[in-house]
Amino acid sequence: MEEFEGSAPGRVTVYSIQGCPHCVQAKATLGRLGVPVCDVDMGRHPELRARVKELTGRSSVPQIFFNNIHVGGNDDLQKLAPEELQRLVNLVKKEPLPADAPPLPEENPPQDAAGGTDGEFVCEKDELADLVGDLKHANVIGSHRRGLTVYKKSFSCDQLVDWLQKEKGMARAEASSTGQALLQKKYMVSVRASGLQEGSFEEGKDALYRLLEDDPNSALNAGQTAACSPIPAAELSLLVRELILKLFSDHLSADGKSVDYKGMLGNPAFDRYCELAVQLQRVELLSLSREEKLAFFINIYNALVIHGSLRLGAPTNMWQRYRFFNYVSYLIGGEVFTLQDIENGVLRGNRKGVAQLLKPFSKTDPRLQVALPDAEPLIHFALNCGAKGCPPIKTYTPQDIDGQLRTAAEAFLENDEACLVDSGKSEVRLSQIFKWYKADFGGTDEKLLNWVLEHMGDSPKKTSLQGVLSAGKTKVSFLPYDWGTNSSH
């Protein structure tokens, strides 16, 4: 919560979330009025969400109050007539704060997202990390031929065991157990497991191994060792999301319309973020519950979009977008996940995405074990692709994830860029998201419209939609999608 002191007896209260462009624009406008403004971050104070919804009838942010008078969101603020805005300013300057003013959170300074006072990531070093560091500089790793194939930066089981005996003074059995531990902890991966079960480490076999950081892939968090003791996935995704979201917010323009990605790239906090993202390499995924998977992969997807935009630039045409979503990736739990893999493979239950001919994961793909059993339509209102037309971004937690996703859908549908109802023409115009993923919402116009109605908050728009549906023969069309980049460069 951020408060600006002033001599006025009243206050303006703004309910917002970090990284919300409309919130930034509203607060910039309010900051020029010369009145005390109290900013309540709903991401850090979700306990107020139900009360604000009760007061406003809306789930979206920002929500703005002058004393106890609800103005609405940013668009409502910008559309106020000058004389009406001046009346509200005078109210705050001259009238004491009434008893029924909107609530503020209890004073409880939030902890830094990364666990330090300056956002620096601090972790407990894993017991095998130093050993891996020594192995990288030993003469064990090299090129090995098996048949017609050459495996670069690889080593055999016997080579590793011999090195552990000679250089680390281990007994043969201990050295073999250490090799198995390195494999289980995902410090290394099997690159040729002839005659071996997946995940096994046995001497005398023809198998080859490679350090995970040397495994050839294009992941943005590859190329160095994750030296920390594995952090629980739910906790790690929150740290990753909060840190990148703070970076995003710090480089959002004053009008909330563009992001200075070049400035983010040069910020020392981005280097700390990259260190944190490396820890995703060895995170445990198979034990996650459905709720934990939803929160984890939504947070990671949204962070990866920003990271990809920083490293590669935001895509500006159809081909670049195809490449971006099929190329930008993280190494997570020993496997590479692209943006397409996360959205369509994991969160949509391994369904084909837009312009995809095949499902992301084959039947033998180990990542299939992580995929949700069914598509979750609500994820489409939580994933942010970096374009102007995407839903607002925030951080999700496993606790009450379904409620959070329903709130995101409700907030999305409040926006006229997502849903417009024309009662006169018996027409409903929806975001392109509903066209692209129509199968997730029932597959037919009727089921789609019923889904939209069910997930709307109580509002005049919902009443209009109910009227149109009850009249029958409703026409469904789709609104243009704004693919414009939010980059300031």
Image: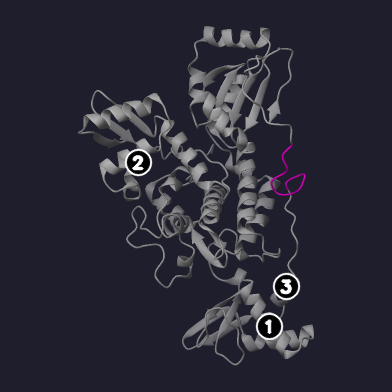
Spot occupied by residue 282 in the image (x, y as percentages of width and height) = 62, 65
Q: CA distance from mark 3 to mark 1?
A: 12 Å
Residue at 68%, 44% (x, y): give it. 267
Q: Which mark is residue 451?
A: 2
Dots 3 and 2: beta carbons under 8 Å? no
Residue at 48%, 83% (x, y): give it. 149
Any part of residue 235 in sight: yes
Asked if 199 appears above or below 111 in the picture, the reply is below
For marks 3 and 1 on the same chain, the one whose residue lies earlier in the sequence: 3
Spot occupied by residue 391 in the image (x, y as percentages of width and height) = 47, 39
Spot occupied by residue 205 in the image (x, y as percentages of width and height) = 56, 90
| Residue mark closest to the camera, 3 vs 1 | 1
Question: For this view, does 384 lie left or right of residue 153?
Answer: left
Q: Quadrant of residue 288?
A: bottom right
Which residue range is magenta in the image?
109-119
| Residue mark closest to the camera, 3 vs 2 | 2
Q: Which residue is mark 1?
A: 177
Dots 3 and 1: beta carbons under 8 Å? no
